[in-house]
Image (cartoon, rainbow, N blue to C red):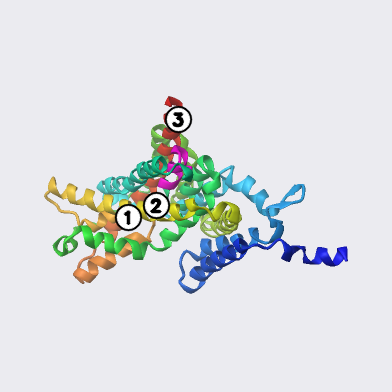
Amino acid sequence: MDDFAKLLEGFLVLRPEHFIMYAIGGLLIYLAIAKDYEPMLLLPIGFGAILTNLPFNMVWQQYEMPGVLKILYDAGILTELFPVLIFVGIGAMTDFRPLLTTPKMIFFGAAAQFGIFATVLMVLGIGELFPALGFDLKSAASIGIIGAADGPTSIVVASRFAPHLLGPISVAAYSYMALVPIIQPPVIRALTTKKERMIHMSYSEVSIPKWIMVLFPIAITIAAGIIAPISAPLIGLLMFGNLIKESGVLERLNRAAQNELSNLVTLLLGITIGATMHYQQFLQPQTLVILGLGLIAFVFDTAGGVLFAKLFNIFTKEKVNPMVGAAGISAFPMSARIVQKMAKEEDPNNFILMQAASANVAGQLGSIVAGGLILSLVPWLLSLA
């Protein structure tokens, strides 16, 4: 009889919350497969959510020993190893030539980080109004960074400041990155006129010498390390990947960084994040609030870039298409393609893809620097309290 009861113990501990999490995991897998929304991450996150909500959660804790996904979490998330390794692959895939051709686009990459800091202030206000949510400054910073549209940076900040919120923050960050084609166009149309969306921009193809392309990642690493020292692991590994690409002498390593390294780390990162989504932590009021605030952060980022471009046009003779400002978020190259598509819908002869790509690349740098500033500012502000 005892043996028979042991066979049934998995059924005996099941709760309605388990099935809710199975449905959430299944939804993420559906979006990855049927809708092609960030499948490399949403599929493993969804499956990880199912795994961690199986009876007794053996993937997280096996009696007195940590489970396999807890080992991966401790080794890859808490140490920030997985996010920084992903940046090596991103750097190897990134071409900074459009940005160097139109360097003024760096300002749009900075302006589009507005949503991060606006959302931090909003979360702090909500935390004051509803103390039961438990939103302190560290939580606010972790939620605000969703607006960076940069999954690895969001993971680094959340794992440092609010590891208990890592699941919903990661899901929000990657889900909204996948939904950028749905989120951005309405915001852009609401803030621009048809005439503004039809603005043409000149672009001259400039041949960038190889020595500049080699020095660029080195110079950016040094500058960012001085401005925001805590961002050095993120931006340093991003620039290291780019240096591998631009050196021209490490083609095998370049291909490995873009393919094998990125694929393997993304796979492990996704399923490990999913494993943090146990129902006891995920099925909380904070989760819905975080999902809503993450959307607001994305909207504010888009709006900040567009409004900065409109302000920029007041002081310059050569007008900028304000839609380019929306491409200043870190969702590369999706956001740049959306901007070009919208420009073509207004005028089939309008080609602003290269300027949008420049702003998009600048947004990648801007999001990492913004993450580094948050990692530096929050402990300093707490020390003053």
Which stretch did the figure color magenta? 134-144
Secondary structure at badge 3 equals helix
Which is nearer the eye, 376 or 122? Answer: 122
Residue at the image point whose x is 36% and y is 51% from the top: 297
Is residue 244 something one can see in this rendering? no
Q: Quadrant of the N terminus?
A: bottom right
Q: Amino acid at mark 3?
A: Leu
Number of on-image labels: 3
Question: What is the distance, in whole Å, between disc 2 and disc 3 at their CAs?
Answer: 23 Å
Which of disc 1 and disc 2 is earlier in sequence?
2
* Front-lying residue, 121 or 32: 121
Q: Are marks 2 and 1 in contact (CB under 8 Å)?
A: no
Q: Amino acid at mark 2?
A: Leu
- Extreme-top residue of the structure: 384
For discs 2 and 1, the disc positioned in front in the rendered view: 2
Q: Is residue 172 magenta?
A: no
CB within 8 Å, label 3 to label 1? no
Q: Which mark sits nearer the N-terminus, 3 or 1?
A: 1
Residue 299's mark? 1
**Can you identify the residue that label 3 sits on?**
382
Which residue in the structure is indicated by mark 2?
293
Q: Residue 181 got which mark? A: none
